Image (tube, rainbow, N blue to C red):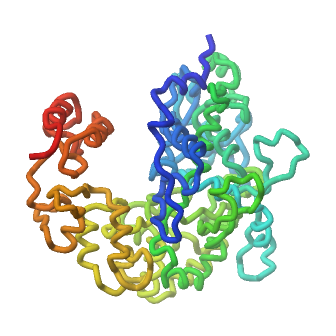
Amino acid sequence: MRIAYGPYFASLAITAASLLVPCAQADTLALQPRAGDPMPGLTATQLERFQLGRVLYATPIPASAGMGPTFNKTNCQSCHSNPVGGWGNASVTHFGIVDKGSFRMVPGETQSLLQEFAVSEFCREIIPTSANFTAIRMTNSSMAFGMVEAVPDAAIALLEDPNDANGDGISGRIHWVRPLEETNGNSPLRAGRFGWKAQIATVLSFSGDATRNEMGITNRLMMVENAPNGDTARLAQCDPMPEPEDVSDQQGFAFIDRVTHFQRYLAVPPQTPKSGMTGETVFINVGCAKCHVPEWTTANTPGLEDAIRNKVIRPYTDFMLHDMGLQGDGVADGYASETELRTPTLWNLRTRDPMLHNGVAAGGLFSDRVRAAIALHGPYGEGAGSADAFAQLSEPNKVLLVSFLNSLGRVEFDDNGDGHVDIIDFIAFKAALGSNSTPNTPNAVHDINQDGTISMADFAYFMQAYEGPNGDCNGNGVADLIDLLQGTSVDTDHNGLPDECLPCPADLTGDHVVNGADLGLLLGSWGQSDVPADLNADGAVGGADLGILLGAWGACP
């Protein structure tokens, strides 16, 4: 019996109403979305699709629903994990035969990608003994894919210089491809912009390709199952399900559509300070911006979503292939040669570990990874000039450039850089209040209006970004953070609450009352450990904690 794939997802306990979050308010000055958030300006329908897609993106798919027989992961988030939809530390292996620098696939194989896992040992792929070459590719980011797809082909083509006519050593070229959803062989080619070889042009093509090649789930864009090492006889024994395994749900969307919605509507990651830093000038002067082009404007095409159409974005890429010399991965893919790689986006770079296509710049401090990655752009290939120019910079200028790169993905008001805005960041804001700021000083993270002074105008937005409790626990009609900022209350234990507020552990929201809001937080933390909702500190949020909360219902003593 065939198991319908769409109904499998429809059976999950998900309701659109339970997933909706408010859209960002239209404002000339507003908090930047965090990496992994939905883009601002989505309609209610688009936001619902984003949230449903996000759940499915993280949901492991069982073999009974079509996953396999060979695969690398059982869900998208396993690779795109930092944050959900972003970079990851997962890698895949490509294999083949290299002869005098020329790559070809092993005879009998249909692709160079190794599926590392299988539904059984009999179905597992191996690297054939005839292969004399392997290469590692790390997970790319899926951030703001809808914005990336909306960059016009013509705008990218204006920068193409395949023969280095400018004489600057940079000869980027477009990888023209046909989207998988274009079944008409005469349809126009698109400029590839996704994948290490720019081999994918649209978000839907990316979803269809990854669903089949990484998860082993055939879909309407890729109907043919991967046979283990090209062995179709073995495939017949390993995969009895008819194709495609991904079918539409009751709303007419297949899995590849759902995860496309999520990736398409992911927000542009923050850049703090968003107007840039002196280090960006250094970045440009050493030649990095020749490939990592800072700014693009999306198409103003009728039919594009309002949230995507005619928007300025700063991904720091030209979307083109470049000859990276020894830093190439050695694998030919379509029209991309063995030494060519697509310029990766740099937005949200501060969270990326490891760096580079093969992950060799890994671990340590952000500065260590960045400096290693820049150095590895040389000594050969199109990045060599910039690598050499960086090496010749004074140490202060190197620090400025690295600091700029560290701003890519930085959350506003996140003073300690841990990705959250909490009491530690409040203490830092309080210390910075009234001080002057420039984009290059550490306190610039608190100057959201960038007027050069950390003021109460900035604090109004800090209150929006703050993730800790901020009620009125002492009942004086003033928010707790304002009491603490003004010094009318103190917080010696740094729990975000004035000391005069009596302990009330079940008051998870800090508003000095135990009610439905606290119950929602507890239920949302069910089964988790090391969270405030673990009221009895037994290592997991469960029924005992629920009993404590219900027993404390009402105003705190």
Furthest residue toward front: 477
How many tags in the picture?
Answer: 0
Furthest residue toward bottom: 394
Q: Quadrant of the N terminus?
A: top right
Q: Foreground: 92 or 132?
A: 92
Q: Foreground: 426 or 442?
A: 426
Where is residue 515? Give x, y as percent.
24, 40
Where is residue 141? Give x, y as percent.
55, 54
Q: Residue at x 17, y 61 (%)?
A: 476
Q: Is residue 64 visible?
A: yes
- Tell me where residue 325 sits by quadrant: bottom right
Q: Foreground: 415 or 87?
A: 415
Q: Considering only vertical position in the picture, is 23 above or below 418?
A: above
Q: Is residue 380 visible?
A: no
Q: Residue at x 51, y 66 (%)?
A: 27
Where is residue 271? Give x, y as percent.
49, 69
Q: Residue at x 63, y 16 (%)?
A: 237
- Tell me where residue 353 sits by quadrant: bottom left
- 500 sits left or right of 271 in the view: left
Q: Considering only vertical position in the picture, is 27 above or below 333?
A: below
Q: Foreground: 514 or 468?
A: 514
- Tell me where residue 456 sits by quadrant: bottom left
Furthest residue toward right: 186
Where is residue 389? Give x, y as percent.
56, 84
